[in-house]
Amino acid sequence: MQRRPHLTEPVWLRTILIVMVLGWLGLFLILPLVVVFHEALQRGWQTYLAAFTQRDAQHAIQLSLLTAAISVVLNTTFGIAAAWLLTRYRFRGRQVLLTLVDLPFAVSPVIAGLVFVLLFGLQGLLGPTLREWNIQIIFALPGIVLATVFVTLPFVVRELIPIMEAVGSEEEQAARVLGASGFTILWRITLPNVKWGLLYGVILCTARALGEFGAVSVVSGHIRGQTSTLPLHIEVLYNDYQSSAAFACASLLSLFGVVVLVVKEVVAWRQRAQLARSNGSAT
Amino acid sequence: MATPRVLPGFGISLGITITWLSLIVLIPLAALVAKSMTLTFSQFWEVISATRTLAAMRLSFGAAFVAALVNLVAGVVIAWVLVRYRFPGRRLADALIDLPFALPTAVAGIALTQLYAPNGWIGSCFVPGTTLGDATLWLVGPHGVLEAIIGSTGVLVDQEGLKLAFSAIGVTLALIFVTLPFVVRTLQPIIEELPQELEEAAASMGASRFAVVRRVILPELLPAAITGFALAFARGVGEYGSVIFIAGNIQGETEIAPLLIVIQLEQYQYGAATAIAVFMLCVSFALLLAINALQRWSNRRAREGG
């Protein structure tokens, strides 16, 4: 985009601003990322790999993967249903539902954990009942999953809504008129149309589920080798002055974070291509 | 609105959505409200007005405000540069903006602590004996220039130099990292869609570039910038994972409000934890309402203007 001189800033100012921005981003974004890998690999590959062979570390990784898998499946199912509801129909109370979907963004992760303790903890509202039935939720897997589901609830829906609004429902209506069932419409038209956005939503949701710290920290009880997820394990290692091991585990999660950024770029690129194609065929 | 419901699935998608939102969001939050109802006002007030709570609130809200302010200024410049200028590395820089969303908070927390601790890459530049360290000590340290002018230096600098980690500065630095994307991402689409005619008209009537930016462009960006600021502020107030490592968590000094909730819970003080949480939630909701009102107002203004 070439702008005429009177519509942009002078070259010297542009150069200064660009250098400032790159410097700022380098200082605040790239340096922390570099530090993670530097600290992780500082003592060589053997120490690095040894961090993952500890029993507690392996258990933490498994627990995190399991938690993330359950949360992502649940929130993706919910996300598709909610996005369909909120983009394909206009009804009273729609705005309320949209606000509720965003609510977990606005709540501190610690408070997200707290509400489940108040509900299911020993002195919680349902505490006595659960104890009678011998069901453990807080300080156990169900609590960790609930807290993670709460925190990651908006990601898939929020990714799908703008795309489904942009694509519109003409194709779906045409399919309906031609006699397709609801399931066929969803499977053959809606999901293929939004597949890239859905992919990004699922990956972002996975990354956040794997990395959730505050909410899980409150409900997990930090029982090593039992209810420690990977981020909690990192905290334990770091506070134990096992810095290399802590950063080794952190580097795993950082790698996943970088994957999220790459997928986001690819998805944005595919979506532009898809929109351009459908606009081209429409005219 | 009366859209004919041609498409099937209204019932089932409504059912799933409402069930899930109730189970995960509504009922748990209702438990919080129910718990807070069991507190009398004086119990609530006792928790909120305790010195330790007040100090934590001041730190959480203060650091979040400063971080959001820094990101407001930096975010306007970053969004402008990323949208308007072409330079090598632009796409990479743009993709990197989302890093704080993608990086787990605990990872960010230990990385930032490592970076700003006195023996870290950045922290070590500020210990006494180094040029920067001596310069900051001379400027804002005890018996320094600042103290000569305003008579106090606060608690940020002692004989060991500028405390970046394990101080309010560290908390703010962590929050700057975590909330960096908000202002940039809310501003980018607005800058992309700025009508060029406005700038052209102003320029052709003889306005200098500076005047165009100040009088034409910045007012257009203001509502979105404030939205981004409020989002960053709200997120910063509740942030936990990235802050607790760098904060140092000294009681009454570098304890953030969410940490206080955790501490109360660990001591099984459910009532006190609830009181702090409810207070924080009320402030956050007030903020969100303000954002919504602001957006409606600016949309209406845009429609009437256009």
Image (cartoon, coloured by chain):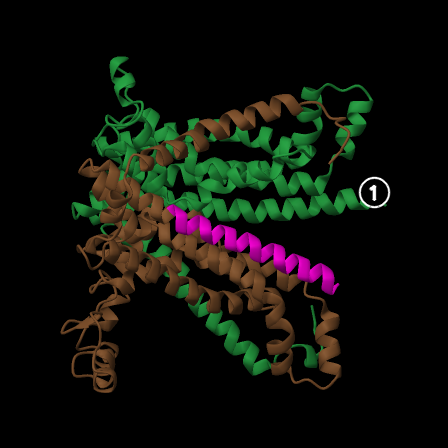
Chain colours: A green, B brown
Instruction: Tell me where the magenta segment starts and ends, as one range.
Output: B281-306
> From what the image shows, is residue B235 above or below residue A211?
below
Q: Is residue B189 left or right of residue B157?
A: right
Q: Is residue A235 left or right of residue A276?
A: left
Residue B296 in the magenta stretch? The answer is yes
Q: Position of residue B4 (x, y in %)?
A: 77, 29
Taking the spot 38% from the left edge, 54% from the top edge, the residue there is: B236
Q: Is residue A131 left or right of residue A173?
A: left
Overall secondary structure of the magenta section? helix
Q: Position of residue A26 (x, y in %)?
A: 42, 64
Return the residue at label 1.
A282
Camera-nearest residue between A101 and A81? A101
Say what secondary structure mark 1 lies in.
helix
Camera-nearest residue between A208 and A147? A147
> Neighbour class for label 1 at 10 Å: few (<14), some, many (≥20)?
few
Q: Position of residue B142 (x, y in %)?
A: 16, 79
Can you see residue A49? Answer: no
Can you see residue A178? Answer: yes
Quadrant of res B35: top left
| View extreme (right): residue | A283
Taking the spot 37% from the left edge, 45% from the top edge, the residue there is: A108
> From what the image shows, is residue A11 above or below residue A61?
below
Camera-nearest residue between A103 and A65? A103
Q: Is residue A276 left or right of residue A199?
A: right
Residue type indicated by callout 1: Ala
Image quarter of the C terminus of chain A: top right
